[in-house]
Amino acid sequence: MRRGAPLDVLIVGAGFAGLYMLHKARRRGLSALALEAAAGVGGTWYFNRYPGARVDIQSMEYSFGFDEALQQDWRWTERYAAQPELRAYAEHVADRFGLRDGIRLGTRVAGAAWEEARRRWTVRAEGGETWEARFLVMASGPLSSPNTPVFPGLEGFDGPVYHTARWPEEAVDFGGRRVGLIGTGSSGVQAITAIAPQCAELTVFQRTPAWAVPAHNGPLDPAFEARIKADYAGFRARNRQMQGGFGSELPPNPVSALEAGAAEREAKFEERWRTGGFSFLGAFRDILLDERANALAAEFVRGKIRSIVRDPETARRLQPRYAIGCKRLCVDTGYYATYNRPNVGLVDVAESPIERITGKGLVAGGREYAFDALVLATGFDAMTGTLTRLDLRGRGGRAMRDKWAAGPLNYLGLLIEGFPNLFNVAGPGSTSAFTNVMVAIEHHVDWIADCIAFLDRAGKRTIEATEAAEAAWVEHVLAVAKRTVYLTCNSWYLGANIPGKPRVFMPLFGFPAYAAKCAEVAARGYEGCALA
Ligand code: N01
């Protein structure tokens, strides 16, 4: 069944990107509709409601800056907001800007096809309903397709299995139960810390240890809030000048870790450790750029792990051996200390891999571990998973999963050759994963809205990247990564967490240079794109 008149903009997703895109499109006088698979808005913050889920960028920064009244009125209760508050914020934004009637909840998009003759997208939901639109905006999120590894026997497990990224709406009671948990990335680190005090016994199956620094979360300091709100626009602008789009209150130290003396280095690491959060990686300017500088920061944190974790063997297993920050740094609230609890055990499944799940637990290294409930904190098919899992067909019926078979070709992260009038928000080729994603989202949505306005003014009906621009862009993203430590480990940035996924470095490091490039492309009449 085809729905109504063609839309200007069809948006996939009603997380923060979808909400702002819908608002922006309407403000520009465009007809727009957002389709959302979930029963509520919020995207990531709708689905990831596992115990302990919390943002790792400070709340005052991890929020929209596009509306002064919104940022003045909204009050965060904690330095790092927990998932329920973030979800409430998304709900508030939907109500405040009257977006509800432009969102179809419970509507999972199955696919979309470009119709060349009519120069439109036809978007199809599961269930068969279709919509037509001039522009298709993928606001489906870089971390929205959960990864459930193939564990033989998983279906035969007697107890409940929970994935952190698809946590049930109703409360899960772990009281008196033995819990097994696989995965120690950001989700695992938070879930382990929160579940351990709730359950009888927690066994963590770790393949790669996480680097974690303390959040020092707590109630939001009213004096800090007042100071930021006195010039919120200035605060946002200063953050946009930072490589990650956040952290201007404590910028990176301009000194090299290699030039500092041992005492100065220790003092600086200690100071940043006490401050908490990602600021640790800015203790010296070259921690993410130079492996030797990185090794000094890494050894400092390994020392912290040894001093926190009482059992030497557990402490040994928890100490990572790869570059700190190479996989996304975790920001924790007592993670390492959780292993001092008598009811928490750590099994290294790198040394003794998981062989199979049984009815009563799992077998690793020839030994069976018993538990009543299983938590999978095994992450996502990041950055490309959502677009390649959809039946997305561009010019000539070409499927996105074929176009991206060897890696996600794109231009500026925003445009894809062969897929006219499709914009991808916060995807591969953009700084999304390396930035405060709220900054990345606002930047992309504003760019997209300006691009559509330009096309309409110029009487053009389509825009798409050229193959040459795409090839050069993908090369540029890799060249930037080569100047960092990011290529020295296996991470989801590289697609290395999914067996068989092409190893292509996907996110771009450095927001200010990226934003400047996007602005320059626009100013030059969308250089690198074919307009018709
Ligand atoms: O996923 P991950 P995540 N056998 O991919 C392990 C954002 N986020 O959901 O490293 C055994 O990081 C895997 O092991 P390995 C943030 O950007 C933010 O935790 O591949 N183990 C790893 O330990 C983050 O980076 C927040 O060897 C297996 C874990 O599962 C991103 O989302 C909170 C396995 C997956 O870790 C993803 O985080 C949460 C197997 N077969 C998430 N397969 C905050 O804002 C996978 N693993 C705080």
Image (cartoon, rainbow, N blue to C red):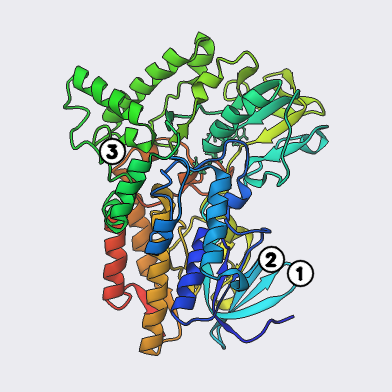
CB-based contact (under 8 Å), mark 3 and mark 1: no
Q: Residue 511 in the image: x percent, y percent?
A: 32, 54
Any mark on residue 18, and which?
none
- Residue 253 appears in the figure: yes
**Please, what is the three-letter code of the amino acid marked with disc 3?**
Leu
Q: How many marks?
A: 3
Q: Which quadrant of the figure contains the N terminus?
A: bottom right
**Please, what is the three-letter code of the amino acid marked with disc 1?**
Gly
Q: Which residue is pictured at 21% across the width and 18% down the height?
A: 262
Q: Which is nearer the eye, 171 or 349?
A: 171
Which residue lies under the disc numbered 3? 289
Q: Mark 1, residues whose alpha carbon is within 10 Å: few (<14), some, or many (≥20)?
A: few
Q: Residue 182 in the image: x percent, y percent?
A: 63, 31
Any mark on residue 107, and which?
2
Which residue lies under the disc numbered 1? 127
Q: Is residue 269 left or right of residue 328?
A: left
CB-based contact (under 8 Å), mark 2 and mark 1: yes
- Residue 440 appears in the figure: no
Give me the C-alpha separation between circle 3 and circle 1. 49 Å
Query: Which one is earlier in the sequence, the residue at label 3 or at label 2?
Result: 2
